[in-house]
């Protein structure tokens, strides 16, 4: 699941780097697009979390950002288009957020074609929770929990209903490291809906609550749309970086690029 997402990001960035839609003077898509003298931006809206019913924040500080995008952690200012959400624009012109969204939106179809997958398949393959929360859930499943003098762990859960059974045959003799590997492998085999159901099943038979499981949006779940973080840590030598959330890009107003001169770092 994670590898699929990284491969998609690489395909997307390579498509953008390869000149897919042309130079800065090209037009973006969207009937309600914003324009300036050089560029037609994809349709979308600048939003503040405090003013939005979505209560959407960039996920909290987390390894899913790669090495550059941590500057967007918990940000509540963003530009949202049909398939993309761009954080990290504070102090820079709104056109930086719009440019990044347009760059990604224009190359989505080409990236899906390179991967040989549909958007629906891609959405199912994306993880539901950020890495920090996934690690917390996995740790509890490995360590187990006590209810009324009885001990439970992942083998206590009714997991067959998710379509992928957990192999517990080696559980009793496995070390802590081996158990962790087993649970991590199972977690990674689940799509977003399976991860959600696993959390709910765990929650139904124990008294220890993982509060983040109840968060429908905000800081603990991977955004439903591809996330771009605009980071001041980007420079002339590194314009883009692939991440689990989507990608990190340089601010366009500070580091101008046309599609065929973008330098990308991939985090895998």
Image (cartoon, rainbow, N blue to C red):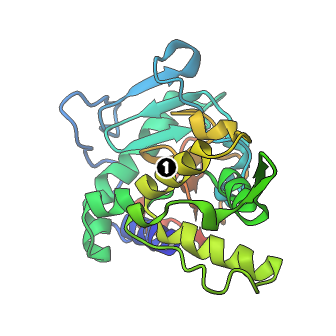
Residue for point 70% across, 39% down: 209
**Residue placed furthest toward the front:** 149
Q: Position of residue 151 (x, y in %)?
A: 76, 58
User: On screen, 221 above or below 34?
Assistant: below
Q: Is residue 146 above or below residue 155?
A: above
Check the picture and name the quadrant holding the C terminus: bottom right
Q: Which residue is more in the foreground, 186 or 1?
A: 186
Residue position marked by numbered label 1 in the rendering: 196
The x and y percentages for residue 79 are 46, 32
Question: Viewed as shown, does residue 147 lie left or right of 81?
Answer: right
Q: Nearer the viewer, residue 11 or 180?
A: 180
**Camera sees residue 188:** yes
Residue 105 is left or right of residue 145, and the answer is: left
Q: Residue 136, percent across and down?
A: 73, 54
Q: Residue at point 42% right, 71% down?
A: 164
Q: Quadrant of residue 82?
A: top left
- State whether residue 239 appears in this view: no
Residue sitting at x 55%, y 80% = 167
Question: Tag 1, which secondary structure?
Answer: helix
Name which quarter of the figure residue 48 lies in: top right
- The foreground one among 211 and 32 is 211
Taking the view exactly as shown, the residue that stands out farthest to the left is 31
Residue 80 lies, with reference to residue 27, above or below; the image says above
């Amino acid at each position: 699941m994670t590898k699929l997402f990284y491969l998609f990001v690489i395909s997307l960035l390579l498509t953008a780097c390869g000149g897919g839609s042309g130079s800065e003077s090209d037009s973006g898509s969207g009937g309600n697009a914003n324009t300036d003298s050089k560029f037609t931006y994809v349709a979308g809206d600048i939003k503040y979390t405090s003013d939005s019913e979505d209560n959407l924040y960039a996920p909290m500080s987390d390894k899913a950002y790669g090495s550059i995008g941590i500057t967007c952690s918990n940000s509540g200012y963003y530009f949202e288009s049909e398939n993309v959400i761009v954080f990290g624009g504070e102090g820079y012109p709104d056109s930086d957020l719009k440019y990044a969204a347009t760059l990604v939106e224009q190359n989505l179809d080409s990236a899906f074609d390179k991967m040989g997958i549909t958007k629906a398949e891609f959405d199912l393959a994306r993880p539901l929770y950020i890495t920090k929360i996934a690690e917390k859930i996995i740790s509890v499943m490995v360590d187990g929990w006590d209810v009324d003098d009885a001990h439970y762990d992942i083998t206590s859960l009714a997991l067959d209903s998710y379509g992928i059974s957990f192999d517990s045959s080696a559980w009793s003799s496995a070390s802590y490291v081996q158990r962790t590997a087993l649970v991590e492998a199972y977690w990674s085999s689940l799509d977003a809906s399976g991860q959600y159901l696993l959390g709910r099943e765990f929650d139904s038979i124990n008294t220890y609550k993982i509060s983040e499981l109840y968060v429908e949006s905000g800081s603990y779940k991977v955004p439903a749309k591809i996330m771009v973080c605009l980071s001041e840590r980007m420079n002339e030598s590194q314009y883009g970086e692939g991440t689990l959330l989507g990608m990190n890009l340089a601010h366009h107003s500070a580091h101008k690029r046309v599609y065929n001169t973008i330098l990308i770092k991939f985090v895998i």
